Amino acid sequence: MTDAAPSVSDIQKYFASASFTQSAARLAQCPLDEGLETAFAGRSNAGKSSAINRLTGQKKLARTSKTPGRTQLINFFMLKDQQRLVDLPGYGYAKVAINKKLEWQKHLEQYLEKRTSLTGLVLVMDVRHPLQPYDVIMLDWVKQYDLRCHILLTKADKLKRGAAKQALMAVKHAVKGQHNTSVQLFSAAKGDGVETARQVLFDWLH
Ligand code: GDP
């Protein structure tokens, strides 16, 4: 890439280069805390895996499996030397025992608090059910640890245009006072909002 602003296709290629590098069950197992990384969080079933797959143009990068065991791991995908995407454990999975939930919560919070290479958090929410209790906890941590946050209101294709816009406005209003937090509509199924999201993440990672 030259010094000129990268084109939409440069940015697309950048994310398409993502490849799985490793999983971690806790902070100590994460790769060295160097360079820059952007993490994805969201309730189980919100559409996080589908969003990662769509953003990278790789259908199977993040497995869209509902197996709670798998979701306990933090998964790292390398983009370039020292630039990474991170898939955090999905939260709120109904069938998981409360002590397991608390354990995940602890690891998630430690990651958000301690990880110095973390440049921002993408919070994935189903546009039809935004700002659930765990999402609000995540937003509190974003504030507490002074992180940047970009909310993807995904599955936007499931609502009519007017209803999707209304949901967007409502969430924008709810996070209005929240420092460094932005919101957009997204659809992994249709590709709506993909370029906008890629641009935000690209800027965070550079
Ligand atoms: P995760 O548990 O957050 O990783 O959620 P998944 O990515 O596995 O998605 C949960 C379900 O929602 C799956 O059946 C997906 O096919 C579906 N889904 C995810 N994103 C979209 C979207 O943008 N539009 C539609 N219509 N369905 C979606």
Image (spheres, rainbow, N blue to C red):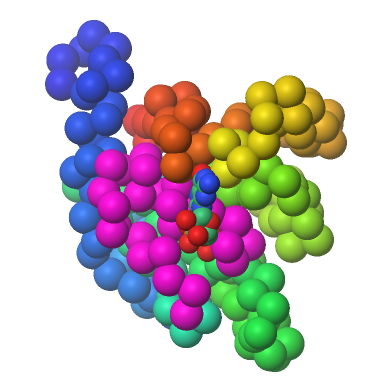
Q: Is residue 112 left or right of residue 188?
A: right
Toward which corner of the image does residue 201 lie, by quadrant? Answer: top left
- Camera-side residue of 146 and 194: 194
The answer to whether residue 78 is visible is no
- Camera-side residue of 47 and 20: 47
Position above or below: 114 against 172: below
Q: Is residue 185 left or right of residue 92?
A: left
- Camera-side residue of 83 and 130: 130
Q: Residue furthest left?
A: 1
The answer to whether residue 167 is visible is yes
Q: Please tell me whether residue 18 belongs to the stretch shown in magenta.
A: no
Tell me which residue sits at (43%, 52%) in the image: 50
* Residue 206 screen position, x and y as percent: 35, 30
Tell me which residue sits at (40%, 25%) in the image: 195
* Residue 159 screen position, x and y as percent: 67, 36
Tell me which residue sits at (66%, 84%) in the image: 95
Q: Quadrant of the N terminus?
A: top left
Look at the image and give the residue range highlighted in magenta: 39-67
Q: Please tell me whether residue 44 belongs to the stretch shown in magenta.
A: yes
